[in-house]
Every structure is written in C-alpha cells, then in structure tokens.
Amino acid sequence: MKATVYHGLKNVSVDEVPDPLIENPTDVIVKVTKGAICGSDLHIYRGHFPLNDGDIVGHEFVGRIEEVGSEVTSLKKGDKVIGPFWVSCGECHYCKKGLHTSCMKGGCFGFGDLLGGHAGCQAEYIKVSHSEGTLVKPLESLSDDSQDEKTLFLGDNICTGYHGAQNGNIEPGDVVVIYGDGPVGLFATYAATLFDPAHVITIGHHDYRLDIAKKYGATTVINSKNEDPNEVVKDLSDGHGANVVIECVGNTDSLQSSLEMSRPGGTISITGLFWEPFPLNMTDFFLRNLNLRGGVAPSRAYIPELMSHVEDGRLDPTHVISHRLPLDECARGYELMDQRIDNAIKVVIEP
C-alpha cells in the first residue's frame, strides 16, 4: 500500500510499504477514506518529536472496516468508523473513567515508539488495535462516504477544542479567551459558546482564520499583530482580565501571555502540545490564585455528544478545510501547513 513515511527533519514522502495485517484477535484493518494533517504532525515534521526513519505518520482518519479479528463482535466488514487519535482498550481503570488517553494499553497513532508504536493513518489502510475500545461508528445520517469531511475532525480537533473548554470550567457570564487561531483554537471557540459566556475572544494573527472564528461564535477577534490582546481583554472585562484562557498553541510565549491575561482566580486550560520546558513563576501563580489545567483530550468519550452538533448543523467542521489533496501529494500538504502557504489551515488527504 501507499503511506506517508517519516524520513527525518522536514522530510516525509509517500512510499510503498507492506499492507497492515491482523496481529491480535481484537484488531481490525480499516480502509482510510479521508485523513488529515494535524498541527501535532507538524511537531514531528519540525523535529520536536523525532521518530524512527520509516515510521508511518498521521492520526486523523475516517474509513471503512476491511477485515476484523476473531474476537471482534461489535464491528464488521463494511462499517464506517471514526478514528479517535488514541488507541484505548475500553476496559482498564482509566477507560472506564472516561480517560481514554490514559489507557494502560493505549497510545497515539502515527507517533512511532514515542507513543505506543501504532502506525499512522496517512495511508491507504491502517491497523487498529483494541478496535472495539477505540473506534466509533457514526450516526446513520453521517455514515455515507459523502459525509466524511463532517465527521473527520471528531477524532481529534473538535474534541480537543471541547476538552479545552471543559477543562476551563466556564460559567455563564464569563470572559473567555481562546489563544490561537489554528483548527483546535477555532473549534475551542465554538465549544466555549456552549457554556453561555458573556464574551468569547479569539486571538491569533491570521485574519482569514479569525474570520472563521466569527462563524464559530467569537464575539471579539484580535489580530495580535495589530493590537495588544491584553488591553482589549482588560477593556472587555472591566479591567479584571479573563476568567478562562484556553491555550491552543503550545509554546512558551503563548502560555506566558495566557497567564498574564488571566484574572486572579482564573483558569488557564492548555490544549496545545508542548515540547519545551516552561519557567512558571510559582510565586505569582500562587499569589493570584490561578488554576492551570491541561491534558490529552479523551476524544472517545466526547464523540457521541459532539456528533449530534455536526448532525444537526450547529457545527459545520468544514469551515477549517483549506486544501484537499490526494495521498500522493501528502508531503506537499505538510509544506503548505508548515509554511502557511496559500492561507493553509487544514489539509484533508484522500487515499
């Protein structure tokens, strides 16, 4: 089969690799019908999380089951499935608590030996371990291949944005800031509106992305290249600062800014994937009674709830799609997203 393979710093290519095989009785093989490139994939591409030469990358996909292991009973050949980015057994202590990304047998697709050794999905086929604890079947109305772009982002970006809002403990009337205008930040913007805040403020530095934030319910957008976000947030909060800041970038500058624009007693909810240490000023953090929360979104737990938002049209995920490419051009998709070429936001890949 063809698959997108890591070969080092900013070097991926679509190569011929062996087809995946059923190895354990709980495995299934999925024929990928749509995949995508995630901001987390760019961390691999940029060398923040180097993999082994030859690892297959990617963790966002929907597809149809091609083959099932002997112990799989709730899934069958031909079923349409949504692939959460994290493998989960569904039976351990953490899965039963809804913390599927803390599964004792799990790991992330496409991150090689760093996160469980599960091959990625930017390929024609993917093997899914612990399939019944991992995969989710879409609602009947969303199960046709023509609906793939609506369900594709439920496996990661939509649920990650929602996780950020949920961790923020947003209360009615709050001032909520979303720091970052990538796909996760845009979906976090939508998720924040579900908790009835007074203000939803999305900060970024791409006007074409901030226009999408408005579609998802942002009451104010701030291009940080043109104005000081701290001053705008103060003006909208009677000088107090934000009740909740959802950090969706994952670097030192964005987290420091998130801390600075939070009011005393506020919450900073981290969804960005960090690869560098952060020098937290514990004295300031302590004296301001701040709350810091974060973690990997347990998409498997959120998909059933959020799928209804997609089904009835409250959320149109396709607003974030900027490019659609065949699998053969996946390497170009990485370049587009890495360098923000042609107003790239989200690249969808079709095998």
Image (cartoon, grey):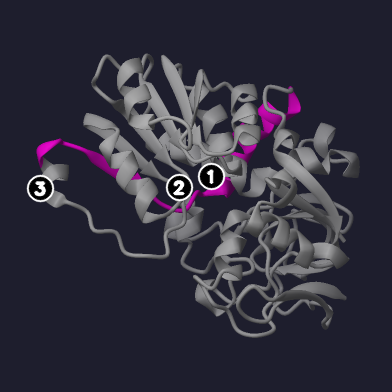
**Picture quadrant of residue 259:** top left
Residue behind mark 1: 160
Which amino acid is tagged 1?
Thr
Which amino acid is tagged 3?
Thr
Disc on the earlier residue, 1 or 3: 1
Instruction: Determine crowd level at label 3: few under 14, some 14-19, many 20+ residues with C-alpha closer than 10 A.
Output: few
Label ID, residue 146: none
Q: CA distance from mark 3 to mark 2?
A: 24 Å
Q: Nearer the viewer, residue 175 or 152?
A: 175
Please indicate, yes or no, whether residue 329 appears anywhere in the rendered image: yes
Name the image quarter holding the C terminus. bottom right
What residue do we see at 84% from left, 64% from top? 329
Q: Position of residue 64 (x, y in %)?
A: 85, 55
Label ID, residue 283: 3
Q: CA distance from mark 2 to mark 1?
A: 7 Å
Q: Position of residue 178 (x, y in %)?
A: 45, 34
Above or below — where is 282 with respect to 113? Answer: above
Instruction: Determine crowd level at label 2: few under 14, some 14-19, many 20+ residues with C-alpha closer than 10 A.
Output: many
Disc on the earlier residue, 2 or 1: 1
| Magenta stretch, residue numbers | 287-312
Label ID, residue 271: 2
Which amino acid is tagged 2?
Thr
Above or below — where is 29 with respect to 297? Answer: below
